[in-house]
Amino acid sequence: MKHILSITGFVVVFLTGLSAQTLEEAKKLYLEAKYPESMPAFEKAVKTSPQNASYNQWYGNCLLETGQLEESEKYLKFAASKNIQEAFTSLGKLYFQTYRFDEAVESYEGLITLLKKKKDEIHDEETQRKLDLAKRAARMLSRCENVQIIDSLVVDKNSFLSGYPLSEEAGSLRMMSEMGGAVVYQNQLKDRRYYGKQTTDNRIRLYSQSELQGKWSDEKRMELPLDTSANDNYPYILSDGVTVYFASTGRESIGGYDLYTTRYNMNSDNYLAPEQMGMPFNSIYNDYMLVLDEFNGVGYFATDRFQEPGKVIIYTYIPNDEIKTIDSEDRDMLSGRARILSIKDTWKPGMNYQAMLAQIKEAASRVTITKKKDFMFVINDNIIYYTLTDFENESARQLFVQSQTLGQQIAGLETELDSQRLAYSKGNKSVASSVKTNETKLEKMYADYRLQVIKARNTEIQYLRQNQK
């Protein structure tokens, strides 16, 4: 009998040694972020020792990292209750990913308290960054906009512009291989284009160019208030010529690219401080390329939220005249609307969105025969002029003619400047002064040209309003 017990004891010791060895292998895989491979050993360990806080943390984090979010919570909460430092971080990540931002705030605050006791300043700084991010997201969720999202389309990321059936009046979007694959927005007048471009500091910045007499000018940087950490890309400009929508990875983004808006101040020749858009437009993923088709009364934006790699979803929505937030304290409902878990939840009763969508798609694909077009000059959302005879006010017509004459002068000066620059590059330093003078002159002429166009438009609008009364 003693012999049998001795054998049994040997077997128990042997199996315990094997289990420990397997656990050590799992820890090694875990530290290499190989969570699926390490998870079975941790699952077995936590079943054997359910009160072991470390086992709960390792298994819970494996569940989290493999997408089993709901299952991970109870193990991570238990580990955190035992002051396992990593569990607070994992819980914060879990709550952030599931839009439970208030609980993410609590987790990071708990970790900061723990770190202060340990005087761990390095990790405390990183946790403070995550805490601030969670607080921003919580504030954004509480102000989720009540917007009608009427359609969605999943497309390949490398051809996502196919999901933007814009009217001619909204301008055009295209990827230009000759510009490094940049997404370029060209306005409805076809005389200005905007895009993001990588600079020497390896950041993407916004640029614009003007077209006069069939030639594009030198690109001009859109000087947004500086955020040196950011990439700014995917610009879109409203027909007013001053309202800009773009995406940025900085400026307190809550995840990858976030959507922002700013306005150009013609008096000071600069842009106002960008304002971050709220949810559901922004998310903890990448959100970009917001476009408003004022003619059709719809907007579009792209996001990779909840999409597999290489795919994005394009949402079509009805813009509000002014921001209307969802009046509710129900966090689950707010979370669902912010994440756009169901576009039908955003619909108004009795609305026929399918008819609207069919009309938009038909208009985008229809080939129309139009009258002669000498130019394209947008007066307002509903009126576009193509010839001088379209003008009803003589003063407005003359102002527009003067702007076109100025445009021809600009084109001539640009040609002269190109020749001077070429001569300078070939060693003729005597033209340096002329180059600088003409560059200054050209910049002023551009400003005068834009002002002349605005005067022509406003004069015509004022005349039309007076004659409608």
Image (tube, grey):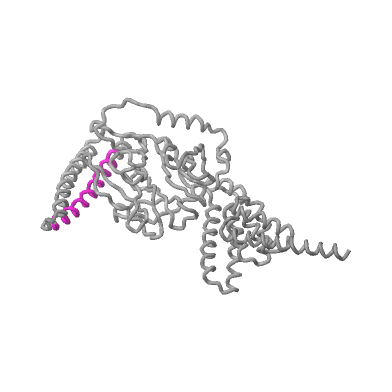
- Closest to the observer, 340 or 405: 340
Left or right: where does residue 121 sit relative to residue 267?
Answer: right
- Closest to the observer, 182 or 389: 182
Task: Specify start and end residues of the magenta stretch as a single range.
Answer: 432-460
> x, y percentage for residue 199?
33, 55
Specify whether residue 439 is painted magenta. yes
- Closest to the observer, 272 or 340: 340
Residue closest to the far right: 1
Q: For the point 42% across and 37% down, which residue is it?
A: 162
Left or right: where does residue 435 sit relative to residue 176?
Answer: left
Left or right: where does residue 364 sit relative to residue 212?
Answer: right
Specify whether residue 154 is painted magenta. no
> x, y percentage for residue 158?
42, 42
- Closest to the observer, 155 or 133: 155
Q: Please, what is the dominant secondary structure of the magenta stretch?
A: helix
Residue 127 higher or lower than 447, as above or below: below
> x, y percentage for residue 299?
44, 40
| Count of numbered labels shown in the rendering | 0
Residue 48 in view in this figure: yes
Q: For the point 26% across and 28% down, which residue is it?
A: 372
> x, y percentage for residue 218?
24, 49
Residue 238 higher or lower than 358, as above or below: below
Q: Quadrant of the C terminus?
A: top left
Residue closest to the far front: 3
Q: Within the image, what quadrant is residue 135 found in?
A: bottom right
Q: Quadrant of the N terminus?
A: bottom right
Residue 434 higher or lower than 172, as above or below: below
Left or right: where does residue 402 sit relative to residue 146?
Answer: left
Residue 237 in view in this figure: no
